[in-house]
Image (spheres, helix red, strand yellow):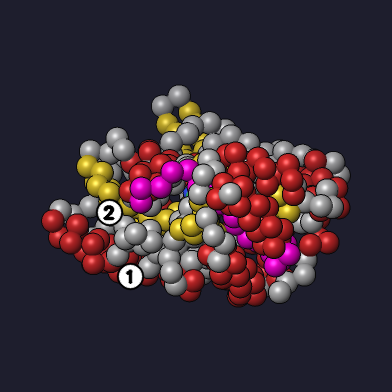
């Protein structure tokens, strides 16, 4: 087990806190807070504008931050477009691809990887099995029946934690001439997301789910995929020159980044990635997998509790959703908060079609990060056992 709780100031401020809602947003380590604070004080300046010392120094630091993000994803610096988050990245692909006519997505998706595609001329939705898994065979059949420009799929479901077979899906998509967009909002801190490893052409992610600040994320894309997109937002910083009858755009990625970027959030996110790097991606995965397994075992043994998702924990990472008989999810989450200072998510988790497909009412979701340990599961389980008993009588 990792032992990094002391790095997170939320626990210093709130020592009894049991934080099991990292799939919604993660806590931030002290180094991220320090970096953001430096940027807002000592380092404060505008970037990519002006030639004074402060601006030049902060611009260099911003470029270094972009390089850190690029390293994490195993791409070149100019293959990282800074966005507002995963949602912003997906919408950039949707609105920036002028002749995007057909998309295949899946029923498992978060609304952010579903709603942007609904007004594409042809939008088809792959089914999933009862555990939330989509299959390369189904994608193959779908693309044989009619080709598509893009396949848009999440790496890890934000409801069930199920890991989709991304490399296989990418292989099928490419064989049929489609590109693959990977919604890596839930996977980017844990699983290999380098395009040459997972096969994705576009990757959408959010800094705030990777121990970084909110308001920032990226569209990571191969240069070839990025070349398909046009800017969707126009303004300062994206142009080389403007005259009354000619506009010359900056090369990618800056042509997609009109306006002043969220400098402190980008620097904070890069610091978070350095921190994750120091932990080691594989160590984090192992830690999270152990907690996921422990939670599934523990909750499955409680009478009146149903754990949803894959039976095979190797295919599930970091997220466990469950229902407590007789308890509406928000009511249960409120009791967890009041009795144990335990934060879990309740509701549909912005994935209503998946709940409908699986015949589920709103669920309780526990999610894990580096700062969690087995005692968090025990504390949550103690309250959930009380709830289950209350109803069973
Ligand atoms: N996709 C998935 C799988 C998610 O879990 C989320 C956030 N819950 C998003 C997309 C959207 O992320 P953001 O709100 O940071 O843009």
Q: Position of residue 281 (x, y in %)?
A: 62, 71
Highlighted magenta segment, given as a residue range: 358-375
Q: Which quadrant is home to the N terminus?
A: bottom right
Q: Is mark 2 within 8 Å of ligand 1?
A: no
Question: Majority secondary structure of the magenta segment?
Answer: loop
Tell me, for residue 126, which label it has, or none. Answer: 2
- Seen from the viewer's position, the closer of residues 131 and 248 is 131
Residue found 63% across the figure and 36% down from its top: 260
Q: Is mark 1 within 8 Å of ligand 1?
A: no
Residue found 83% across the figure and 48% down from its top: 14
Task: Give the Cα distance between marks 1 and 2.
Answer: 15 Å
Extreme-left residue of the structure:
145
Residue found 77% across the figure and 51% down from its top: 17
Q: Is residue 147 above or below residue 76?
A: above
Q: Position of residue 25 (x, y in %)?
A: 63, 48
Extreme-top residue of the structure:
244
Check contact, mark 1 vs mark 2: CB within 8 A. Answer: no
Q: Residues within 10 Å of mark 2 (few under 14, many from 20)?
A: some
Residue found 13% across the figure and 56% down from its top: 145
Position of 175 with respect to 240 (left or right) is: left
Q: Is residue 34 above or below residue 48?
A: below
Q: Position of residue 391 (x, y in %)?
A: 56, 46
Q: Is residue 9 magenta?
A: no
Residue 257 position by quadrant: top right
Q: Which residue is labeled 1 in the image?
A: 168
Residue 240: in sight, yes or no?
Answer: no
- Name the front one of labels 1 and 2: 2
Q: Secondary structure at mark 1?
A: helix
Mark positioned earlier in the residue sequence (1 or 2): 2
- Seen from the viewer's position, the closer of residues 256 and 300 is 300
Q: Is residue 363 magenta?
A: yes
Position of 148 with respect to 190 (left or right) is: left
């Amino acid at each position: 087990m990792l032992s990094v709780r002391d790095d997170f100031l939320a626990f210093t401020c709130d020592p009894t806190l049991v934080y099991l809602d990292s799939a919604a947003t993660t806590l931030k380590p002290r180094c991220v807070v320090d970096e953001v604070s430096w940027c807002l004080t000592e380092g404060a300046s505008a970037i990519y504008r002006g030639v004074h010392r402060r601006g030049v120094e902060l611009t260099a630091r911003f470029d270094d931050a972009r390089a850190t993000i690029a390293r994490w994803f195993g791409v070149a610096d100019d293959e990282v477009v800074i966005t507002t988050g995963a949602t912003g990245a997906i919408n950039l692909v949707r609105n920036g691809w002028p002749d995007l006519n057909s998309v295949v997505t899946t029923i498992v998706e978060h609304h952010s990887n579903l709603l942007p595609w609904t007004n594409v001329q042809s939008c088809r939705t792959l089914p999933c099995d009862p555990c939330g898994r989509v299959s390369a065979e189904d994608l193959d059949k779908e693309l044989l029946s009619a080709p598509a420009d893009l396949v848009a799929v999440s790496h890890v479901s934000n409801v069930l934690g199920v890991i989709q077979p991304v490399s296989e899906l990418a292989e099928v998509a490419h064989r049929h001439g489609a590109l693959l967009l990977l919604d890596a909002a839930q996977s980017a801190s844990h699983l290999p997301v380098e395009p040459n490893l997972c096969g994705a052409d576009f990757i959408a992610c959010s800094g705030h789910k990777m121990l970084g600040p909110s308001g920032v994320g990226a569209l990571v894309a191969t240069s070839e995929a990025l070349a398909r997109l046009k800017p969707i937002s126009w303004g300062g910083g994206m142009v080389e020159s403007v005259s009354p009858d000619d506009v010359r755009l900056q090369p990618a990625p800056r042509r997609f980044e009109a306006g002043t970027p969220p400098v402190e959030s980008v620097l904070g996110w890069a610091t978070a990635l350095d921190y994750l790097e120091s932990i080691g991606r594989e160590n984090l995965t192992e830690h999270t997998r152990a907690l996921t397994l422990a939670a599934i075992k523990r909750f499955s043994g409680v009478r009146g509790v149903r754990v949803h998702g894959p039976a095979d924990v190797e295919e599930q990472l970091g997220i466990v959703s469950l229902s407590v008989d007789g308890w509406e999810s928000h009511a249960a989450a409120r009791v967890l908060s009041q009795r144990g200072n335990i934060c879990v998510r309740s509701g549909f988790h912005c994935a209503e079609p998946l709940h409908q497909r699986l015949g589920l009412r709103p669920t309780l979701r526990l999610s894990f990060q580096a700062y969690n340990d087995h005692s968090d599961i025990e504390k949550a389980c103690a309250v959930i056992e009380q709830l289950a008993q209350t109803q069973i009588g």
